[in-house]
Amino acid sequence: MRSLGDAIEKPNLELVMYLHAVAALDCSLDTYTEAIPFLERSVEILVIDEGPNHALAKFVGLEIQRQILGENDPLFGETCRYVAEAHVKAFQFDEAEKLCNVALDNHKQNASPAFPKEEADRRLMGLILDSKGDHEAALEHYVLASMAMAANRKEIESSFD
């Protein structure tokens, strides 16, 4: 039998489901701000390579985040990218494309620049489209990812001046 300390030190699906349950309880009590740290932790510790149950748990966390934070919250966009990556690993490119588009739309909705995250989302979308055989659209996203990376580098360099 595993101890609680083992569950916390070695992330596993049982811990994730516990965190989701606590977050759901907080939501039912209308204490949404209390639920957010549990959701953030549950999304961070999932290991997508551990199988479809981990991917499903991450998706459950995504749906709870959508309800609590809303689709315009940057954390929600980041989680969409993580779940899209899980779908790519499972060769579910249509679902990955939908989630990656949500993440990209999330960047447009947020006023603050998110170049590193946009770059990652663009690269992922390029990979998805390339895998689906849409090489022209994939190339477009790779170019946009490069432009975001260059803009980010320029922004970092100007902050040192």
Image (cartoon, rainbow, N blue to C red):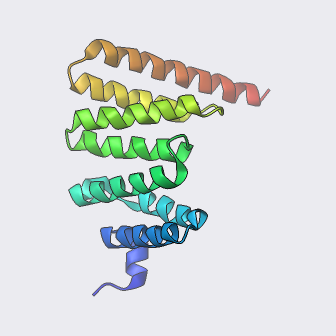
- Image quadrant of residue 51? bottom left
Q: Residue 150: percent from the left, percent from the top?
A: 57, 21
Q: Is residue 5 above or below residue 50?
A: below
| On-image quarter of the C terminus | top right
Q: Residue 30: percent from the left, percent from the top?
A: 56, 67
- Taking the image as drawn, is residue 51 in sight? no
Q: Residue at x 40, y 28 (%)?
A: 123
Residue 9 appears left or right of 98: right
- Image quadrant of residue 137? top left
| On-image quarter of the N terminus | bottom left
Q: Residue at x 43, y 32 (%)?
A: 121
- Image quadrant of residue 11? bottom left
Residue 28 appears left or right of 18: right
Residue sitting nearer the eye, 3 or 23: 23
Q: Residue at x 53, y 72 (%)?
A: 29
Residue sitting nearer the eye, 150 or 27: 27
Q: Residue at x 68, y 26 (%)?
A: 155
Q: Is residue 92 above or below residue 13?
A: above
Residue sitting nearer the eye, 83 or 72: 72
Q: Is residue 63 above or below residue 87?
A: below
- Taking the image as drawn, is residue 75 in sight? yes
How many badges with numbers are in the image?
0
In the orientation shown, which residue stands out farthest toward the right?
Answer: 161
In the orientation shown, which residue stands out farthest toward the top?
Answer: 136
Q: Residue 90: percent from the left, percent from the top?
A: 21, 44
Residue sitting nearer the eye, 29 or 1: 29
Q: Residue 61: percent from the left, percent from the top?
A: 40, 57
